[in-house]
Image: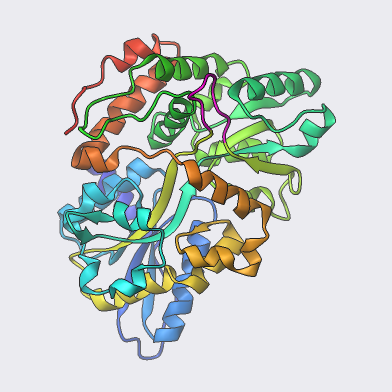
Amino acid sequence: MLRTASLLAASLALSAALIHPAQAKVTVSISCSSLGIEMELCRDGAQAWAKQTGNEVKLVSTPADAQERLALYQSLLAAKSDKIDIFQIDVVWPGILANQFLDLNQFIEPAKLDGYFQTLIANNTVDGKLVAVPWFVDAGMLYYRKDLLDKYGLKAPETWADLEAAAKQVMAGEQGIEGYVFQGRSYEGLVCNALEWIVSNGGGGLLDNGGQASFNNPQATAAVDRAKTWIGGIAPQGVLSYDEEQARGAFQSGKAVFMRNWPYAWALVNAPDSPVKDKVGVVPLPKGDGDKAVHTGTLGGQSLAVSKYSANPKEAVDLVLYLAGAEEEKRRAVKGAFNPSLKSVYNEPELKDDAFFSTFSKILESVATRPAAVAGKGYNQFSSQFVRAVHATLQGQGSAADNFASIRTSWK
């Protein structure tokens, strides 16, 4: 509780009023992620709404680490705090936090929701209650150094074997460069990576529709055991403590050939001051071996939910709809490479002919999903057990099969 309290104090200390109209109607507070340039984009969008409506908006900076942010949210909501009106939530949190959010069906006409990807609307609907509006959609993807692959006559990898071979070849010819960086820390990001390894190798999902564990099979364990061989080889030992930003930092500074990350990294690696600007390409993540191998990326994304304890629910919903509206989603896509949750925005000229967004649309065709809906409120516990088993395997503490055997088998 002390850690959560300190996180809250730090977050609220960073709160900043974005605009002060002479006669502000109400003040709406919103939590935004501090990952990459998310805070900047959130601030600019919220400020535009405040100017348009005459209301005031306060930003609450929350931890970039998803588990820390969830713990903060749970503490605030359990206390029925009105410090935050709008919560930016992860794609796997609706089932965990549903009881603390308003049913947005009571505020939003159904026609306004038709334009969103309906898989995202379904993901945000718990027991018939729409707990959040989709804001942007994510999926894991592979970033690679075009210049280095060209130098050695290599193509973007189709399989994990291709990636391993290419990484070793470039590492042998270049000083001070790693082959592959990803999110190897023991947190939710590693769940996403491991799910991609497993599904891409034909190992299926993590839980079946009945909530029974389905990941302890030969294809799944082989995929995680394979990843273990990367540590200290094509991947640095330090990758076991990497999150998204640490992986991006290594790749963007020119110290890695390949990186697994979310779409947000695209705008940053191509920023004017980036050492790898215009040297990077993106493709779907590699597939494994065998007939069941597929390209996949873990489905991610963020939505906006309104607290049951908000003193200004109508204004909060209005801000949610503004931020998740077509113009704002297009702006975020162009400036930050955040993929829209509205289907129509992909047809905008700025996005339609862009190679990055066309690649992402292909990735969306075969995404892997975490079993948040199946596990419901138990997902957080399942995720913790699963990620501990995967991390132990990567550290060389037993095989994937042995570590998976320690995870509870029923989650319904």
Going by the image, does 214 lie left or right of 81?
right
Going by the image, does 74 lie left or right of 147?
left
Furthest-front residue in view? Answer: 291
Percent across and percent down for residue 386 are 32, 26
Percent across and percent down for residue 54 are 39, 86
**Which residue is rendered at x = 30% and y = 32% of the image?**
383
Q: Choose top left, top right, bottom left or bottom right for residue 173.
A: top right
**Which residue is rendered at x = 63% and y = 29% of the image?**
158
Q: Quadrant of the C terminus?
A: top left
The answer to whether residue 103 is seen in the rendering is yes
Q: Is residue 292 magenta?
A: yes
Q: Choose top left, top right, bottom left or bottom right for residue 331.
A: bottom right
Q: Choose top left, top right, bottom left or bottom right for residue 353.
A: bottom right
Q: Main secondary structure of the magenta part?
A: loop
Q: Nearer the viewer, residue 2 or 142?
A: 142
Percent across and percent down for residue 306 are 27, 65
> Bounds of the magenta span?
285-294
Going by the image, does 296 lie left or right of 82?
right
How many numbered circles are shown? 0
Q: Nearer the viewer, residue 192 or 186?
A: 192
Q: Is residue 382 above or below residue 33?
A: above
Percent across and percent down for residue 14 are 41, 60
The answer to whether residue 235 is seen in the rendering is no
